[in-house]
Each structure stands twice: as structure tokens, then as C-alpha cells.
Amino acid sequence: MRKKGILITGAAGEIGMALIESLSKQEEYRLITLDLKPLEPESERFVTHVQGDLLENSLLARLVSEYEIGIIYHLAALLSTRAEFTPEAAHKVNVEGTLGLLKLASEQSQWRGEPVLFIFPSSIATYGVPDLEIKAQFPHVREWEWNYPRTMYGCNKLYCEMLGIYYSQYYQQLAVDRPVMLDFRAVRFPGLISAFTLPSGGTSDYGPEMLHAAAKGEPYACFVREDTIIPFMVMSDAVRALIKLADAPVDSLSRRVYNVTSFSLKANQFRNMVLKYFPDTQITFDPDLSRQTILDSWPAGLNDNDAQRDWGWHPIYDLESSFSDYLVPNIVELYRKFKD
């Protein structure tokens, strides 16, 4: 008899490591993780880790032969800045990888006779506001507004949202006996800040990079203008949002894709928060035009009213507590351990 499992792809990334820590406390399902890289030793003891490529069909076939996968957290992706340098590779990983996993989840839903829960972290990159004037006029964007992404990563994420909706609502709609559909749910995240893992190439990483540089006592040249504004969220709230959406009763959901957010602030305000805790840090601004253009197309804030209403979403950490209670103490401790 196959063992019940939760599959986490891209498990060695920022969200994956935090998600493993949270989900390791449950006992009903075995955690199966998949990534091109090995996991940190402290995480491997909680999971069955498979080191390999999501695009390998034989690898996925082996997983479903051993486990009855009831929940999938699909985190694997090529992030925004890297995707601009290799758009074809990004499409292969972000779209083809997701499509193959949706197909697997659909087949597993039919085999089980009940939906596989498919949780998908999406991104603020799915938005594309045309200019700064309009950005100022729409300070809190709803899910259906300005879905005109300017990056390959944003295009990939938006298309994958649509694929998820298709497989959960319309797949084999012409069949006489329609199969059991999977249960696809997506969260559109703002810029994410982790206290425990280093920034990994996202366009919004100027904030985390600023903070980590300060904790290491290094100067930092920020690649955006001082007035650049986007929303942010700390990693622990992001993981909590994924789990909270996964736990929500399906009949409480009015959408398949939800915004979540915590706080918005300008780059110079972010610098001021960093200087509050690391007053000797040297932080300058040296905008990179290409990345600046992308960030200018992202909303200044996200409207997450639907998530609040449908599944009780609310961040634990606001701006002040994100720094004072989560980011600064944990980052200081992280680099203290490195020095030791």
C-alpha cells in the first residue's frame, strides 16, 4: 500500500526550507521533497528528499509509484532576474515543469477519487502597471487589475495560474463522464524577506540584500531609486499564508488566485529602517535601469481583501514588528553563528 505524502518541489529554496520546518510537525503525511540541490542536513531528517529534475518524467513516475500524493506545494521556479537572461530556460522550468505536475495531480485526483490539493506560490510579477502616474492612481491593486506582466517570470506565473484554473475547473469538459478535478489554489506574494536564507536573485531582493549586508557590516549599493515602492512580507508570514490557504474549506473560496500582503515602503524608508538597527551601515543608491523599469511596473500595494474575507488571512508582522521581532534578531544570530 502506498504511503500518504505531501510533495514539495523547489524545497531547497527560501520558501521551501521554511515550509519544511512548519509542515514537519504534522504526522498524517510523509514529506517528500524534490530539488536539484541537496537539503540542509537539519532539514533532511524530517523528509524523504529526492535530488533531481522536475522535468524528468521517470522521476515523477517513481514518486507516485511509492506515495499517494494528496497535497503538492509547487515552489520550484527560475526567479525573475535570472529568467530575463534565460527566458527559454525559464519557460521550460516555470511553465513546462508546472504543466507536467498539474497533469500528474489530475491523474492522481482521478485515481484517488478525490482532489489533490495543489498549492502554487505566484507573484507580484504577474502585474504590469504602464507608468508611475497610473501606479500612483492604483495604490492597492486587485487580482484582476493590470495583469500585463513585463517579465518572462511574470508571464510564466500568470499563465500557470490560468493552467491551474483550467485543470481544476475545465479539464476534460467535453467528456461524458468528467473526472475528479484537482484543487488548485494560488497566492500572489509581494517581495519576500527571509531572516534565515540569503537572497537568491529576485528583482525585489534589494530590500533583503540591504539588510543582510548591514548585518555583515558590509556597504551596499542599492540597485533602485530611493523613491521605488513595492509591498513586502516576511518569510514566516508567507509560509503561514500557504498553509492557511491549504487548510481553508473549498466552499469558503471565491477565487483560485489570491493576493496577500503585509506592508509597503519606499527604498529610502527601507534604508532608514535598516539604519535604525545598524546605524554604521553605508547604504547608497545606484539604480540599474533594467531592473528599475520592472519594479516601476509592479504595484505599490496589493489589495488582499478577498483573502481576508474568504480564509481569514492577516499577516502577523507589520513593518515595525517585521524588523524588531523577526528580521533583525534572527539575522544578527545567523551571522553570529557564521563568525563562531
Image (cartoon, rainbow, N blue to C red):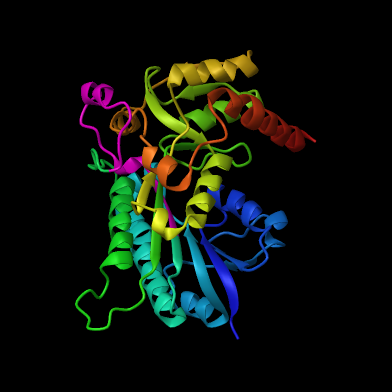
* View extreme (bottom): residue: 1
Q: Is residue 122 magenta?
A: yes
- The magenta region covers 119-143
Image location of residue 185, percent across then percent down = 40, 56
User: What count of labels does the image hold?
Assistant: 0
Residue drawn at (40%, 52%) of the image:
186
Image location of residue 39, percent across then percent down = 63, 58
Figure quadrant of residue 334: top right
Residue drawn at (40%, 58%) of the image:
251
Is the residue 279 above or below the residue 98 in the image? above
- On the rendered structure, is 138 left or right of 107? left
> Can residue 188 be seen?
no
Q: Is residue 269 magenta?
A: no
- Quarter that holds the C terminus: top right
* View extreme (right): residue: 340
> Can residue 81 be seen?
yes
Image location of residue 96, percent across then percent down = 34, 64
Residue drawn at (48%, 42%) of the image:
313
Is residue 213 or residue 180 the one in the foreground? 180
Image location of residue 181, percent across then percent down = 35, 71
- Quarter that holds the N terminus: bottom right
Residue drawn at (48%, 32%) of the image:
262
- On the rendered structure, is 122 left or right of 334? left
Is residue 27 or residue 322 the one in the foreground? 27
